[in-house]
Amino acid sequence: MIISPTPRSGSLALLTDLYQLTMAYGYWKSGTAEKEAVFNLFFRKHPFQGGFTIAAGLEHVIHFLDHFRFSEEDTAYLATLTGNDSKPLFEEGFLNYLLDLRFTCDVDAMPEGTVVFPQQPLVRVRGPILQCQLIETPLLNMMNFQSLIATKASRLKLVTRNEPVLEFGLRRAQGVDGGLTASRAAYIGGCDATSNVLAGRLYGIPVRGTHAHSWVMSFDSEEEAFGTYAEVLPNNTVFLVDTFNTLEGVRKAIQTGYQLREKGHKLGGIRLDSGDLAWFSIEARKMLDEAGFPEASILASNDLDEHIIASLKEQGARINVWGVGTRLITAYDQPALGGVYKLTAIRNDAGTWDYKIKLSEQTIKISTPGVQQVRRYSDESGFVADMIYDTENRTVGKNPVMVDPADYTKRKKLSHLLPHEDLLVPVFREGKLRYTLPTIHQIRERVKTQLDGLHEGIKRFVNPHIYPVGLEKSLYDFKTDLILRLRNAVS
């Protein structure tokens, strides 16, 4: 993993918000730093008004936590921070505590590539409250962004009907790390290759690329530009044909194709980057086929996204390779996933759990208490429902009932005979890594398998069907009772 800029010390402990450190200082100063707590990372709404989300970013989370420490450079910097009175914000004893701090929490998480839904914990952290608090911001940073991009990529792959999608977004990405992590997440979500060579080396992603308009413009003619490129790279011959006149460019690419054929090579195809992509691709396909190049691909780019691609498909476009850049790499129509990280339980002095809940005037923002797990039920047709339950104080019955947290009238009885699995798996135990990381290719395959388990209606872009997710009834009842008790206490 690369995060740029990387501190000289190699420590990423300061990749956080200041208020995480001020709260950590408060826990340390008040003697509560070692109190056992549980936090859940989840999101409230699917991105892109869709019906599913792809969990991504866990590998970076694991790397971060496995190397979590404060360096002397970190604490020296923290010693320079001052409060409103211009005095040091943190005392020396706390900074020494941070120097000696090592990660000792338990972490459970959904494997990367899992299809996930609102209110479900993607990551559950259990351990000393100070440590749980310090890692909130970096976990959200890593999970939110990569899950967002992986989801966008999966939508692109769905709309192209499994035709190749190439990620071309590095030049428009949000900085170096934004480009690298987005390339990784896009490949996980379904993209077939990236133009980002460093991402290719770091993550083992296939890399692809053609040439730019500047190549053509640097020669006296398109014929010379295409011919020279074919001589230099006869095994990478996709020609950008819209520098001057698109259909004339296609004709010249065809002439170069004949020259390649005479030398025992193939014309890879053409690339369209402007104009009426549907009409040009239809005309180009006719020309290529009539010239004897039916296997030559037509690649299109130019600010594509899933909605534009869907429109092009409806217009009968003959494009069969899709280069997507800006609108994928930046998640153009929704630049952030609203993931949150909430305290759900804390161990009291008697050694039992006090369950915690955040109240709100908005029902969607009321958190769920407990040490949560997600159980996914399936049948022969695919996924049936996901039930969130508490692992500590409430047992799952033989035929459990789950309740929609936003509408108590929506209930679903689940048979114990249905195959099911618990989605949160052990990752760290007492700070020690217990999880075997899959390869990026295995994660990508998991996305495909997970999407195959969803009903087609959930994957549509307009008014997608809502996949059933609910709280196990006893957890729902406990949550409702806790809400009423807290509201009565403050009324």
Image: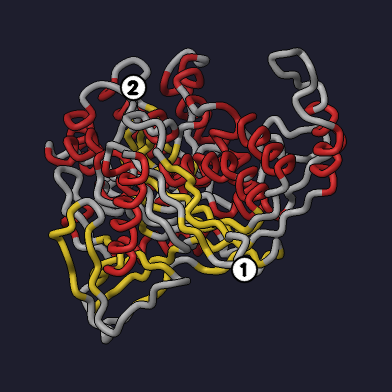
- Residue 10 as seen in the image, left or right of residue 465: right
Residue lying at 48% horizontally and 25% vertically, measured from the top left: 172
User: What residue is drawn where x is 36% and y is 40%?
Assistant: 490
The crowd level at tag 1 (other Cα within 10 Å; few <14, some 14-19, many 20+) is: few
- The reply, left or right, for residue 303 in relation to residue 35 is left
Report which quarter residue 317 is drawn in. Answer: top left
* Residue at the (62%, 45%) spot, across then down: 135
The residue depicted at 68 percent of the width and 49 percent of the height is: 32
Q: In terms of image quadrants, where is residue 273?
A: top left
Mark 2 crowdedness (10 Å alpha carbons): few <14, some 14-19, many ≥20: many
Q: Nearer the viewer, residue 363 or 432?
A: 363
x then y, percent, for residue 323? 38, 37
The residue indicated by pointer 1 is 436
- Residue at disc 2, secondary structure: loop
x, y percentage for residue 453? 28, 67
User: Where's the C terminus, which quadrant?
Assistant: top left
Residue topped by disc 2: 242
Residue 20, placed above or below residue 388: above
Residue 38 numbered tag: none
